[in-house]
Image (cartoon, rainbow, N blue to C red):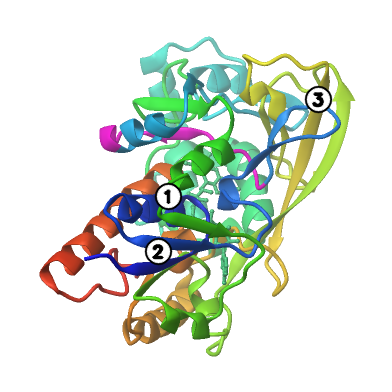
Amino acid sequence: MSTSCLMVGAGLSGAVIGRRLAEQGHKITVMDGRPHIGGNCHTERDTETGVLVHLYGPHIFHTDDEEVWAYVNRFATFRPYKNRVKTTTRGAVYSLPINLHTINQFFGQTLRPEEARRFIEAKADTTISDPQTFEEQALRFVGRDLYEAFFQGYTIKQWGCSPTELPASILKRLPVRFNYDDNYFFHRFQGMPEEGYTAMIARILDHPNITVHLEATVTRDRAAAFDHVFYSGPIDGWFDFRLGRLGYRTLDFERFSHKGDWQGCAVMNYGDVDVPWTRITEHKHFAPWESHDGSVLYREYSRACGPDDIPYYPIRQVAEKSLLAEYVALARAEENVTFTGRLGTYRYLDMDVTIREALDCAAAYLRAVGDGGAMPAFTVNPL
Ligand SMILES: Cc1cc2nc3c(=O)[nH]c(=O)nc-3n(C[C@H](O)[C@H](O)[C@H](O)COP(=O)(O)OP(=O)(O)OC[C@H]3O[C@@H](n4cnc5c(N)ncnc54)[C@H](O)[C@@H]3O)c2cc1C
């Protein structure tokens, strides 16, 4: 049986679900309020320098999921890429995540791995037995010196509050490596799509059963015209924010250009609280196989998200979670709408997780259509 489905959002969620259903004969309409596809993964060429830019912040693909890795490689050529982040703090440049090089440089030591482990254990605040806050967790893991230099200022800027107000769960495990591995991610598969994410998503959407409409913002009253709607916009937005707005952090990007190489790496964090930006990204370093004389960079600032700003990071503190629970109850009462993706479920999702959940969501819909069952409002639990 063929159905007609509306994908609200032409980001990874809408594109991946739409493609899977289109391949099974369903008619797919994709609508996005923006003038481009790709959602927040959107990449485009900078007109001045020709450099490929990640317009909504730097995106590095990494995953352990073999099916997801095979999926993205079907639609794009991936070049090997390791994310090696640096940070400027207290007038010096260090390697992140904190590793043996960082420790030796910061403390002026020449420690080997086991010596460094004992050294850091001696710095850790063992009087904290049951850490409740981000600050307590960091102090317990790494002690005050590393915490203040590498976590405190950056966290205040990123979240707009003191680490004493954030839950310990943000820092789940020891954020330190006792070797010289400075690869930011642990995942087996890592890379960059040679022509950018938007080209990859364009290929995902390129199917005779898919029609894409841009600059087309969808409201709830449009749903009735389709057999089913997959909504990857903000869950509170679907209900016209009638219970209030879920809290997000938004980002401001300040562009500047330069001849040659400005900072020598793709991402430079800034740990000091008196430097207002959190990081500077020099996009040409994401594509070392290309050659550009000019360079384009973005300073990134984080602040509270207002009604007209782009929502980036869900806050998910106690107050937001209780409001989310109310919206989830409303969503579960909707007919023929499934809420997906980072905004539809109000969670931070890496791209590989977004694709995994989109593939699972499409499979659930195909099963429901096949056996006449109901398609739920969520195929993952957003709470
Ligand atoms: C700063 C930043 C850096 C990141 N870096 C990485 C990284 O390095 N690696 C990684 O794996 N992941 C990264 N991510 C995560 C990645 O951006 C997400 O996994 C991905 O964008 C989720 O795709 P999505 O389709 O769910 O949402 P989105 O990309 O947000 O797409 C949703 C789309 O829906 C549209 N929309 C919303 N409401 C409506 C409406 N009512 N009508 C029509 N259209 C609507 C929006 O315009 C948008 O285009 C990063 C995220 C951020 C914020």
> Which residue corresponds to the image point at 34% horizontal and 76% vertical from the top-left?
227
Please identify, in this view, whether the residue under mark 1 or under mark 2 is nearer the observer: 1
Q: Foreground residue, 71 or 81?
A: 71
Q: Which residue is mark 1?
A: 208
**Please, is residue 349 above or below residue 292 in the view?**
below
Question: Residue 241's spot in the image, x, y percent?
Answer: 57, 84
- Identity of the residue drawn at 86% across and 36% down: 256
From the viewer's side, name the closer residue of 382 and 170.
Answer: 382
Q: Is mark 2 within 8 Å of ligand 1?
A: yes
Find the residue positioned furthest to the left.
371
Tell which quarter ligand 1 is in.
bottom right
Disc 1, SS: loop
Which numbered disc flags the more N-terminal residue, 2 or 3?
3
Check if mark 2's residue and mark 3's residue have beta carbons within 8 Å.
Answer: no
Instruction: Report x, y in % for residue 253.
Output: 76, 48
Above or below, comparing residue 326 to residue 75 in the picture: below
Q: Residue 336 falls in which quadrant of the image?
A: bottom left
Asked if the stretch drawn in magenta spans residue 334, the answer is no
* Earlier-in-chain disc, 1 versus 3: 1
- Badge 3: how crowded within 10 Å, few (<14), some, or many (20+)? many
Instruction: Report the Cα–Cα distance between label 1 and label 3.
Output: 38 Å
Q: Label 2 belongs to which residue?
A: 340
Residue 190 higher or lower than 327, as above or below: above
Estimate the x, y position of residue 229 in percent, counting from the top left: 40, 72
Element on which disc 2 rests? loop
Amino acid carrying mark 3 in the image: Ser
Q: Residue furthest front?
A: 208
* In this rendering, position of residue 47 left or right of residue 214: right
Residue receiving disc 3? 295
Mark 1 CB within 8 Å of ligand 1: no
- Kind of residue sitting beneath label 1: Pro
Q: Secondary structure at mark 3?
A: strand
